[in-house]
Image: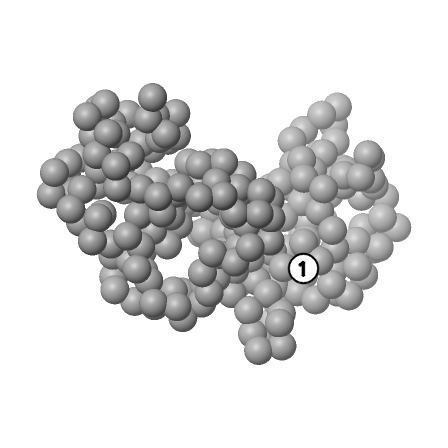
Amino acid sequence: MSLLKNIAPFSSLRTEILGILDRQIRVRPYPKGVVIYCEDDVATGMFIVVQGSVKTYTANNKGRKLILRECAVGDSFGVIEMLSGTTRLCSAITREDSLIAAINEGDFRSMLAKAPEIWKSLAIGLARDFKPLTWHLKNLALFDVNGRVKNLLKAASTESDGQLIVNQRLTQQDIADRIGATRERVSFVLSELRKAGVLSERDGRFVLAENAGENGVERESG
């Protein structure tokens, strides 16, 4: 069976097309915390998460990070730079032990010549990425840190008995890296939310009152 058979958006491709892909990709294990590529590296190919997860991020010269995207099984990354011929727009690092499939640019263009329908599958994946990216940009541009923290927790949660339970175990640094704030500022906001009675913790996960955002969120000035 093809390695990509059960991975969207490739699962809809014909068996013979999956066979072409399997012959061109190279799959290797990456332990947790391994950098796959760095910002400004020459982009020579694209990647697909087969198992595990990856985050892409940018950082300044002081080491402060902003997470741009979290890639789960079936997600591709590094595609835009490969197609546009630019250097890497961000860095990519594994969030856990992972299996990553790599396809270099030459092999990718060769595959397209043999199976142009691969474009459709890839386009579906890229289009799916625009919604979280738009949300991320909106959160950064239109909300203060208080609002960004609440929006992130709400987006990462599921509703249960009138409460929003965050699915991931997030540290203060995790939150800071996702919303473009300092850990100290995030710590202050979390403390204020606890005092207001809208935030608690259960089994190492944040629990947010369902009405946490009813009082509104101030926009940043300027």
Which residue shows up at 23% across the image and 23% down it? 15
Q: Position of residue 31 (x, y in %)?
A: 57, 47
Q: Position of residue 176 (x, y in %)?
A: 67, 59
Which residue shows up at 52% across the image and 58% down it? 35
Disc 1 residue crowd, few under 14, some 14–19, many 20+, Cα 10 Å: many
Q: Position of residue 89 (x, y in %)?
A: 40, 65
Which residue shows up at 28% across the image and 52% down it? 104
Disc 1 residue type (three-letter) = Ala
Q: Position of residue 117 (x, y in %)?
A: 17, 35
Location of mark 1 (residue): 176
Q: Residue furthest left?
A: 113
Q: What is the quadrant of residue 63 in the picture?
A: bottom right
Left-right relation of 170 to 84: right
Q: Is residue 59 above or below residue 92?
A: below
Which residue shows up at 57% across the image and 78% down it? 61
Q: Is residue 76 above or below residue 2?
A: below
